[in-house]
């Protein structure tokens, strides 16, 4: 679904979002007055050079960080109106993360890693276990549920991370260079899986990438240059959907 679809409901609205960091008393601006709207169910590729503010933008949308100016509305709720505790609860419920370096908990089994976001949302026991195992089945790793992450390949670890990101059924998936640490065959496989599961469940995704091949799965590409949004283009694949 595109943002200009007449029935599209925005999941994310950014209005005049600015963010900078102070270093040695000097403000280094990172994002300048970013305006953007993301429709529910859309996949957005976020591109731009290293240091252009992509991860900063994800941290603002997930409420890990707060903007210096502007407003961020996700699912009808303004993040800048929330206190830190409210933002933490919002993030737990609403957001699933996939990182470049997988970030699985090494001391927990595969199944326990996928159960974590469910537990944080108060879902435990058989219902949690059933739904985690179902997701592990969908990423093709149910048979490895008692293994520890260090026994798995990079691609397998990322598939577990995808299951974990989806476990609590968040509305929003934030994926920061999810294939940046995988070889190209594994990358294509993991990306196809992520794309399929996100679309199947109607979730909205912001996907940071340097790769035009990865960006091609998105409906739109947003490009950041020196903290400004410079391009907002529909992809060819979106036209076919
Ligand atoms: N916590 C922080 N403190 C100070 N500077 C930061 C912090 N996080 C990011 N930056 C700076 O903000 C800029 C954008 O960083 P980032 O959003 O990580 O870029 P990208 O993900 O596009 O590579 C960089 O110059 C980075 O050094
Ligand atoms: Mg980054």
Image (cartoon, rainbow, N blue to C red):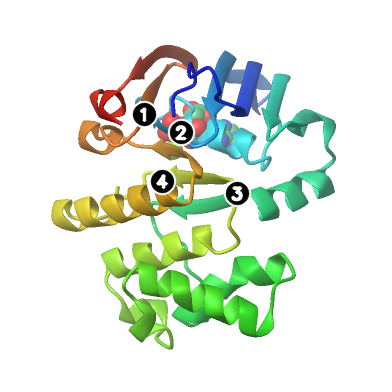
Q: Which mark is residue 156?
A: none
Name the residue carrying label 1. Answer: 219
From the Cβ of disc 1, is ligand 1 less than 8 Å away? Answer: no
- How far apart marks 4 and 3 lie (CA) works out to 15 Å
Specify which label sits upstream in the sequence, 4 or 3: 3
| Element carrying mark 2 | loop
| Residue at the image point whose x is 60% and y is 49% from the top | 95
| Element carrying mark 3 | strand
Q: Does residue 113 appear anywhere in the picture?
A: no
Q: Is residue 46 above or below residue 70?
A: below
Q: Position of residue 38 (x, y in %)?
A: 53, 26
Name the residue carrying label 2. Answer: 42
| Residue at the image point whose x is 53% and y is 17% from the top | 6
Specify which label sits upstream in the sequence, 1 or 2: 2
Q: Which mark is residue 95?
A: 3
Q: Does residue 205 appear anywhere in the picture?
A: yes
| Element carrying mark 1 | loop
Q: Nearer the viewer, residue 134 or 62?
A: 134
Name the residue carrying label 4. Answer: 199
Specify which label sits upstream in the sequence, 3 or 1: 3
Q: Is residue 223 above or below residue 122?
A: above
């Amino acid at each position: 679904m595109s943002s200009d679809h007449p029935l599209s409901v925005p999941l994310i609205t950014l209005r005049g979002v600015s963010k900078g960091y102070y270093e040695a008393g000097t403000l280094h601006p990172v994002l300048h007055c970013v305006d953007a709207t993301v429709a529910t169910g859309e996949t957005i590729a976020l591109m731009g050079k290293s240091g252009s503010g992509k991860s900063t933008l994800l941290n603002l949308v997930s409420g890990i960080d707060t903007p210096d100016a502007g407003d961020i509305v996700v699912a009808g709720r303004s993040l800048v109106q929330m206190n830190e505790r409210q933002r933490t609860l919002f993030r737990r419920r609403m957001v699933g993360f996939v990182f470049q370096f997988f970030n699985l908990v090494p001391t927990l089994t595969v199944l326990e890693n996928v159960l974590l976001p469910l537990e944080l949302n108060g879902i435990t026991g058989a219902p949690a276990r059933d739904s985690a195992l179902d997701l592990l089945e969908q990423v093709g790793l149910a048979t490895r549920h008692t293994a520890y992450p260090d026994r798995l390949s990079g691609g397998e670890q990322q598939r577990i991370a995808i299951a974990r990101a989806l476990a609590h059924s968040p509305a929003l998936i934030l994926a920061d260079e999810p294939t940046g640490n995988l070889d190209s065959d594994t990358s294509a496989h993991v990306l196809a899986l992520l794309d399929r599961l996100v679309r199947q469940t109607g979730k909205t995704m912001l996907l940071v990438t340097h790769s035009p091949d990865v960006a091609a799965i998105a409906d739109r590409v947003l490009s950041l240059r020196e903290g400004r949004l410079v391009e907002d283009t529909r992809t060819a694949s979106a036209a076919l959907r």
